[in-house]
């Protein structure tokens, strides 16, 4: 009798903690929505999204999200272009080529990379990367979208490597044997059989990498130059959605339109990351043929 | 008259680490014949088969000595080209293992890898290969279908067709019917009789009737040793060794 009661108690507790996570997400969403409605009810949603001027404290203020969205897009795009080839190559090396000792060392190294606080990466970016970019491209300042992309690539890499590595190792051994038994070389086997079979996992890894990068704040705040202007190349300073919120939240007058506009940015960010994660999930759980 | 021997195995010893899985195996396989390898579980049949295309090389810590000649060429030589060897000696696995690609891509895989053909020529190889495993009529309209959506029997045929496409000399089959139902098994056996005109076939099987039905020669393995090797008809009617007799009459294994 008592055991039965205990069982039911445990069941309830587990159920509640599961539900709590869902409720929390919903609450966050509702809160963001409520605060940003205060903003979006006073401006036109679409002109805000596509307006290219972000001057929140000029008179009259202009709340164009476009430079911020593009700032995030540029930095994220750059980071993914760098992180995906290296990440996938590293994953192939770890799962297919590396002898087991080196494999362990590499995996630990990559976990350590994931554990570096982003502010430390930002710091390294300022003192080491930015001067280099400035020198190589002969720019007035090295604090550019490119600097952000490179640092964020380091942040996305652990996610990408570990998910791709998982996808590669879960490709059935029988595919590999079948290919080798047909006389294909190891590399041909990787390229023609293992990579295609792991493709959904690779796409999911890229998506989650994007999600990781687009939500990152501290490093980009420190090393992208923080200029809310419409970017044309990776060699310009940019301001991302996240950096805008972080930089302005401290100085804004509570309850002002500017204050609510930051929630509007948060809302846009939330929607973007939500969809990216959703897509990643769809690819990850799509049936492997 | 002495028939041509395509495979000659002499004093073959094989070790997984310290464990000896094959002990002094000697045998000669006749060209364009079906040779069955039987024996209780763990006696080394798969190990032996995998020596013939050097698939055991994938396993760490193995050691092998003796001699295996295929068409007069020593394949245990460390200098030999594994790509050429495996093109010549194809393998069909216990579980059908088509690639998760389309039917067409599965067959085109070998010719592509070995740069045998492209374009129309490749298409005709695909067609010919499917025809030779009697799968063309069933699949000719669904060549783009994912191979994993086929029935198990079709998948196993496809795996055989995939080998046929690279024109091997020898087909190694490791319990190719063990995941198939009796009807499908009979059909694959029928296919083997047809394929024997063009290929030399070695088949590992646990199914005594299958060995008796389909093979011309039979070898009986026990604890890593080849106990007896002879024409199938003699093995099954007048086995020379008492252990062979006990095995085929079902007293162990
Ligand atoms: N990778 C391996 N490492 C170590 N030992 C192995 C390995 N593969 C097989 N063995 C051992 O070698 C012996 C022969 O194995 P093998 O797979 O060749 O037997 P088999 O005759 O094919 O058996 P079955 O009929 O069950 O398929 C067995 O005792 C097995 O445990
Ligand atoms: Mg076996």
Image (cartoon, coloured by chain):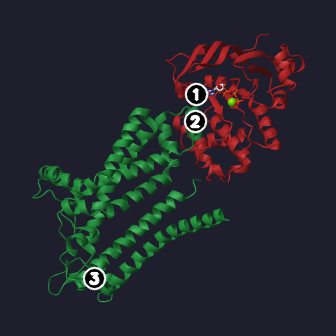
Chain colours: A green, B red
At horizontal 71% and vertical 46% (from top left) the residue drawn is B152
Residues under labels 2 and 1: Cα distance?
Answer: 8 Å
Can see residue B169?
no
Residue A139 placement: quadrant: bottom left
Give SS at disc 2. helix
Q: Are marks 2 and 1 in contact (CB under 8 Å)?
A: yes
How many other residues sit within 10 Å of disc 2, few (<14), some (14-19) or many (≥20)?
Answer: some
From the top left corner, tell me how far across and down residue A191 is, in percent.
Answer: 47, 42
Left or right: residue B110 compared with residue B171 = left
- Residue B130: quarter of image: top right
| Residues tagged 3 and 1 counted as in contact (Cβ below 8 A) | no
The answer to whether residue B225 is visible is yes
Q: Is residue B81 above or below residue B195?
A: above
Per the rendering, the mark at residue B29 is none
Relative vertical location of residue B112 with respect to residue A225 in this rendering, above or below = above
Closer to the N terminus: mark 3 or mark 2?
2
Category of crowding for the residue at label 3, using alpha-carbon neighbours closer than 10 angstroms: few (below 14), some (14–19), many (at least 20) = many
Determine the residue located farthest toward the front in the rendered image: A2
- Provide the residue designation for mark 2: A177
Residue marked by disc 3: A260
Q: Is residue A249 left or right of residue B68?
A: left
Return the residue at label 1.
B55
Quadrant of the picture in which ligand 1 is shown: top right
Q: Work out how far the residue at label 3 is from the one at label 2, CA to CA, in angstroms.
A: 59 Å
Q: Is residue A194 above or below residue B200?
A: below
Dot 1 falls on which chain?
Answer: B
The residue positioned 30% from the left and 65% from the top of the image is: A73
Q: Is residue A280 above or below residue A62?
A: above
- Mark 3 against mark 1, which lies toward the viewer? 3
Label 1 sits on a secondary structure element that is: helix
């Amino acid at each position: 009798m008592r055991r039965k009661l205990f069982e039911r108690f445990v069941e309830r507790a587990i159920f509640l903690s599961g539900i709590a996570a869902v409720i929390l997400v919903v609450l966050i969403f509702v809160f963001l929505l409520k605060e940003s409605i205060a903003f979006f009810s006073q401006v036109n949603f679409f002109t805000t999204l596509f307006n290219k001027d972000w001057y929140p404290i000029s008179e009259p203020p202009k709340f164009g999200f476009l430079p911020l969205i593009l700032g995030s897009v540029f930095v994220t795009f750059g980071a993914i272009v760098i992180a995906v080839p290296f990440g996938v190559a590293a994953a192939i090396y770890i799962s297919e080529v590396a002898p087991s000792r080196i494999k362990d060392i590499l995996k630990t190294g990559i976990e350590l990379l994931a554990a570096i606080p982003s502010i430390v990466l930002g710091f390294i970016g300022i003192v080491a990367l930015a001067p280099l970019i400035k020198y190589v491209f002969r720019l007035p300042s090295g604090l550019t979208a490119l600097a952000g992309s490179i640092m964020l690539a380091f942040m996305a890499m652990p996610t990408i490597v570990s998910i791709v590595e998982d996808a590669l190792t879960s490709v059935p051994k029988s595919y590999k044997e079948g290919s080798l038994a047909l006389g294909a070389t190891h590399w041909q086997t990787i390229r023609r059989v293992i990579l295609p079979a792991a493709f959904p996992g690779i796409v999911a890894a890229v998506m989650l990498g994007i999600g990781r990068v687009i939500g990152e704040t501290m490093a980009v705040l420190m090393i992208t130059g923080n200029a809310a202007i419409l970017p044309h190349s990776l060699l310009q300073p940019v301001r991302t959605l996240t950096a805008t919120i972080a930089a302005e939240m401290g100085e804004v007058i509570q309850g002002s339109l500017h204050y609510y506009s930051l929630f509007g940015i948060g809302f846009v960010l939330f929607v973007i990351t939500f969809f990216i994660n959703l897509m990643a999930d769809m690819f990850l759980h799509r049936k492997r043929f | 008259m002495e028939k041509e021997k395509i495979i000659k195995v002499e004093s073959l010893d094989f070790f997984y680490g310290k464990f000896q899985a094959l002990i002094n195996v000697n045998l000669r396989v006749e060209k364009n014949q079906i040779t069955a390898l039987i024996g209780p579980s763990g006696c080394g049949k798969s190990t032996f088969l995998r020596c013939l295309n050097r698939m055991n090389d994938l396993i760490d810590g193995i050691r092998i000595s003796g001699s295996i000649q295929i068409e007069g060429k020593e394949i245990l030589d460390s200098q030999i080209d594994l790509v050429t060897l495996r093109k010549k000696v194809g393998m069909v696995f216990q579980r059908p293992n088509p690639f998760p690609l389309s039917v067409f891509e599965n067959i085109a895989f070998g010719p592509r890898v070995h740069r045998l053909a492209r374009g129309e020529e490749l298409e005709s190889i695909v067609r010919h290969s499917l025809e030779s495993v009697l799968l063309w009529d069933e699949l000719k309209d669904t060549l783009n279908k994912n191979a994993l959506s086929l029935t198990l029997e079709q998948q196993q045929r496809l795996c055989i067709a995939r080998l046929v496409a690279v024109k091997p000399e020898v087909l190694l089959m490791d319990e190719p019917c063990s995941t198939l139902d009796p009807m499908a098994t009979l059909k694959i056996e029928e296919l083997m009789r047809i394929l024997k005109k063009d290929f030399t076939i070695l088949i590992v099987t646990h199914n005594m009737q299958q060995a008796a039905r389909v093979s011309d020669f039979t070898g009986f393995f026990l604890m890593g040793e080849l106990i007896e090797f002879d024409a199938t008809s003699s093995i099954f009617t007048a086995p020379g060794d008492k252990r062979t007799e006990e095995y085929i009459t079902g007293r162990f294994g």
